[in-house]
């Protein structure tokens, strides 16, 4: 029996008016949940996604039909590990680039909050080069707790295994917020940042990294662009990110396209996937990594209180 999916207005402005823009031959909104679960885990012959529509009012690209929170809990809870991960050294280079962007626009002091830090690669840079008094890390994955504790060892810190619980964070205390590749995944990103606002000091800085749905790669690959997937209920570009943050009383300080580091073999495999060739084994090319601007954007904004 088909599981009903939720119906959504625009997650940024609430408008019901939108125009279809990206859709698969077989649409996820008309597909059984059991099959979408297999596709979520990477087992598919044909790419199936929820239809993306463009809001006629604020121009955000989003899925008017999507999984419910209950569906997402089940999907993320059983998601298998990626055995072809980007090397740790490459991940560290990418995160250091994000940190250097923040450093240009922040004095790196006060209290620090990161949503979804994983093993703490970004936070590690803050500990080494920043002057933060307290670290609040919201990471639902309990398995990385020891690694996170090691990163903030010797610092006042709190690791919270819940992404939506800000209750333990004192009001008017946070000077820096970091949210890397999280906003694309939230069903209600506006409400999420709204609920965080009372924890922020006036003039607090927020750093956000998302995919860029106006990137050149999106134009080349069209529906085969990897971020068009079941994990992303909406996608942003530079303008819609600015519009999104302005609605929450943030002032944009700087935006740019990010440089990410990958193994050549990883890029080749995903390039082939983008053209519909599901090949899992490609030459390693001696593990060489390269830094490329491949469709992500970074934003630093100031909270005006």
Image (tube, helix red, strand yellow):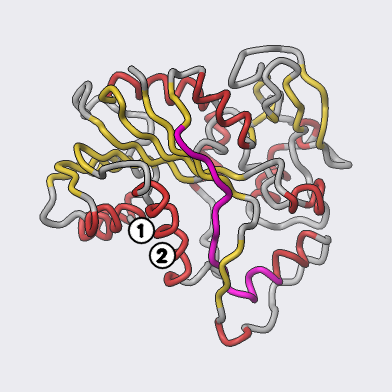
Q: Is residue 45 above or below residue 49?
A: below
Q: Is residue 257 left or right of residue 193?
A: right
User: In percent of the image, x 72 and y 21: which residue is there?
Assistant: 55
On screen, residue 304 above or below 157: above
* Viewer-nearest residue: 247 or 268: 247
Give the answer, above or below, for where 40 lies relative to 274: above
The residue at 25%/44% (across/down) is 108
Query: Where the C terminus falls, by quadrant?
Result: top left
Dividing the picture into quadrants, the one containing residue 304 is top left
Q: Element under label 1?
A: helix
Task: Determine contact: label 1, label 2, CB under 8 Å.
Answer: yes
Residue 82 sits in quarter? bottom right
- Does the segment drawn in magenta span residue 267? yes
Is residue 189 located in the magenta-colored stretch of the structure? no
Q: Nearer the viewer, residue 275 or 295?
A: 295
- Circle 1 packing at 10 Å, graded few (<14), some (14-19), many (20+), is many
Residue 117 place in picture, x, y as percent: 37, 49
Badge 1 is on which residue? 121
The residue identified by callout 2 is 92
Image mark count: 2
Residue 223 x/y as whole percent: 81, 46
From which residue to which does the magenta span run? 253-268
Q: Is residue 22 left or right of residue 108?
A: right
């Amino acid at each position: 029996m088909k599981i009903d999916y939720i119906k959504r207005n625009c997650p940024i402005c609430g408008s019901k008016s939108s125009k279809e823009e990206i859709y698969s031959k077989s649409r996820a909104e008309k597909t059984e949940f059991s099959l979408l679960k297999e596709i979520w885990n990477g087992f598919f012959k044909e790419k199936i996604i929820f239809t993306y529509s463009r809001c006629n009012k604020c121009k955000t690209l989003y899925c008017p039909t999507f999984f419910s929170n209950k569906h997402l809990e089940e999907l993320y809870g059983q998601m298998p590990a990626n055995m072809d991960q980007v090397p740790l050294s490459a991940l560290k280079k990418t995160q250091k680039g994000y940190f250097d962007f923040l450093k240009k626009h922040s004095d790196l002091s006060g209290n620090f909050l990161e949503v979804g830090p994983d093993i703490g690669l970004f936070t590690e840079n803050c500990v080494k080069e920043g002057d933060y008094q307290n670290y609040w890390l919201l990471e639902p994955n309990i398995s990385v707790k020891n690694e996170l504790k090691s990163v903030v060892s010797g610092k006042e810190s709190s690791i919270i295994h819940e992404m939506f619980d800000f209750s333990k964070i004192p009001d008017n205390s946070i000077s820096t917020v970091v949210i890397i590749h999280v906003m694309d995944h939230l069903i209600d990103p506006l409400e999420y940042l709204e609920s965080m606002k009372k924890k922020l000091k006036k003039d607090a800085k927020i750093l956000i990294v998302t995919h860029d749905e106006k990137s050149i790669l999106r134009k080349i690959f069209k529906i085969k662009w990897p971020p068009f997937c079941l994990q992303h209920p909406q996608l942003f570009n530079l303008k819609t990110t600015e519009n999104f943050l302005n609605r929450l009383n943030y002032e944009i300080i700087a935006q740019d396209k990010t440089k990410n580091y990958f193994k050549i073999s990883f890029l080749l495999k995903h390039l082939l996937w983008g053209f519909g060739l599901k090949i899992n084994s490609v030459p390693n090319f001696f593990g060489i990594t390269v830094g490329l601007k491949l469709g992500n954007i970074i934003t630093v904004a100031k909270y005006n209180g």
